[in-house]
Image (cartoon, helix red, strand yellow):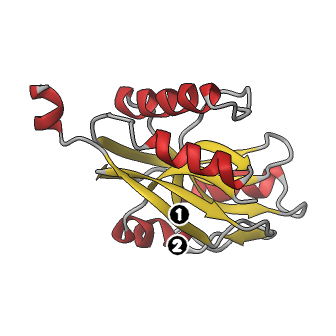
């Protein structure tokens, strides 16, 4: 059974810039730069037949390309941080792309998590020694910094069950519409 999810790829130049944030946080397992991505929809472990249906249905998604704005760093997990990530600003095109995929996946019978979507790029997963205080200090030192890029496609990734995720394999890629083409339709 493949474990699948859809995502926007992070271009290598942006990944390299984000990788400069690595280090200085005890208990962090840093994500490999080539595995940076912005998850849109987690599909999970599904059978091959449903995986084929998902891949085919995603081919019908027609959305404009997405201007991605990365703005600073943060952590998930509150008092017991679980990961640190680069914040992605939730633009209308990004949120509409994500919502359209979730609607499509629900129609296919894929169980979707009932939590608010927070676009981000995971930088590291944290072990227990990464206390809230250490993580807060790390975040304060890394501060802001803005990066941006245009996502011209989204991908269907597969992954194996492993600690920290990855490696991720692009199973299918789906072009987003260039803005000029999206406006003229």
In the image, taking residue 149 as reference, residue 128 lies left or right, namely right
Q: Disc 2, disc 1: CB below 8 Å?
A: yes
Counting other residues with Cα less than 10 Å from the Cα at mark 1, is it few (<14), some (14-19), or many (20 or more)? many
The answer to whether residue 39 is seen in the rendering is: no
Residue 156: % across, % down: 52, 54
Could you tell me residue 27's position as x and y percent? 81, 69
Residue 33, disc: 2
Q: Nearer the viewer, residue 131 or 173?
A: 173
Question: Is 57 placed above or below 109 here?
Answer: below
Quadrant the C terminus occupies: top left
Q: Is residue 14 left or right of residue 144?
A: left
Query: Residue extending furthest front?
Result: 49
Query: Residue 169 placed where, x, y %?
Result: 56, 69
- Compared to 171, does 150 lie above or below? above
Q: Where the N terminus falls, by quadrant?
A: bottom right
Query: Which of 171/52 is in front?
Result: 52
Using the image as rendered, state which of residue 84 and residue 181 is in the foreground.
181
Residue 90 seen: yes
Q: Which mark is residue 159?
A: none
Distance CA(mark 2)–CA(mark 1): 5 Å
Q: Is residue 158 above or below residue 57?
A: below
Residue that label 1 marks: 36
Q: Secondary structure at mark 2?
A: helix
- What residue lies at 54% left-to-right and 29% top-to-bottom? 104
User: Residue at 74% across / 49% down in the picture?
Assistant: 46
Quarter of the figure with residue 26: bottom right
């Amino acid at each position: 059974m493949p474990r699948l999810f859809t995502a926007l790829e992070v271009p290598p130049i942006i990944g390299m810039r984000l990788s400069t944030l690595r280090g200085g946080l005890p208990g962090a397992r840093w994500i490999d730069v080539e595995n940076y991505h912005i998850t849109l929809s987690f599909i999970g472990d599904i059978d091959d037949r449903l995986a084929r249906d998902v891949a085919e249905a995603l081919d019908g998604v027609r959305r404009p390309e997405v201007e991605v704005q990365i703005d600073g760093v943060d952590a998930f997990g509150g008092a017991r941080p679980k990961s640190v990530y680069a914040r992605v600003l939730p633009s209308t095109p990004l949120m509409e792309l994500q919502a359209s995929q979730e609607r499509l996946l629900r129609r296919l019978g894929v169980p979707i998590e009932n939590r608010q979507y927070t676009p981000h790029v995971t930088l590291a997963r944290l072990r227990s020694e990464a206390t809230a205080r250490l993580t807060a200090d790390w975040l304060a030192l890394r501060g802001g910094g803005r990066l941006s890029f245009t996502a011209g496609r989204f991908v269907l990734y597969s992954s194996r069950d492993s600690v920290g995720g990855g490696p991720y394999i692009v199973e299918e890629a789906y072009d987003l519409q260039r803005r000029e083409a999206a406006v003229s339709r």
